[in-house]
């Protein structure tokens, strides 16, 4: 049997993308007035959707988030 395609899912094996994502989210949120560290992003928002995280942040700050944070 010939193999036409092999897919390697190395996320978390070769590169830990959660760390990169948490840094990027923390930098962007802090830039737009919601100061947060990458560790706090990991603790608070890991495992929930971006939409859920945004709604949580909006509830905390009492206003809508900037357009940049919305899909």
Image: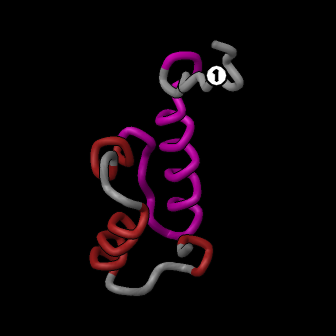
> Does residue 12 lie above or below 26 as drawn?
above
Query: Residue farthest to the front?
Result: 1
Q: Quadrant of the C terminus?
A: bottom right
Query: Residue farthest to the top?
Result: 1
Residue 38 in which image quadrant: top left
Residue situated in front as seen by the camera: 34 or 11: 11
Magenta residue check for 4? no
Q: Quadrant of the N terminus?
A: top right
* Residue 58: percent from left, percent from top: 36, 77
* Residue 9: percent from left, percent from top: 54, 26
Q: Which residue is mark 1?
A: 6
Residue situated in front as seen by the camera: 5 or 58: 5
10 Å crowding of disc 1: few (<14), some (14-19), many (20+): few
Residue situated in front as seen by the camera: 71 or 1: 1
For image coordinates 53% across by 43% down, the residue present is 21
Magenta residue check for 25? yes
Q: Which residues fall within the magenta stretch?
A: 13-39
């Amino acid at each position: 049997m010939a193999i036409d395609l092999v897919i390697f899912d190395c996320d978390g094996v070769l590169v830990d993308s959660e760390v990169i994502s948490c840094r990027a989210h923390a930098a962007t949120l802090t830039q737009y007035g919601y100061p947060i560290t990458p560790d706090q992003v990991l603790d608070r928002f890991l495992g929930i959707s971006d939409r859920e995280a945004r709604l949580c942040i909006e509830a905390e700050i009492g206003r809508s988030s900037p357009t940049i944070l919305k899909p």
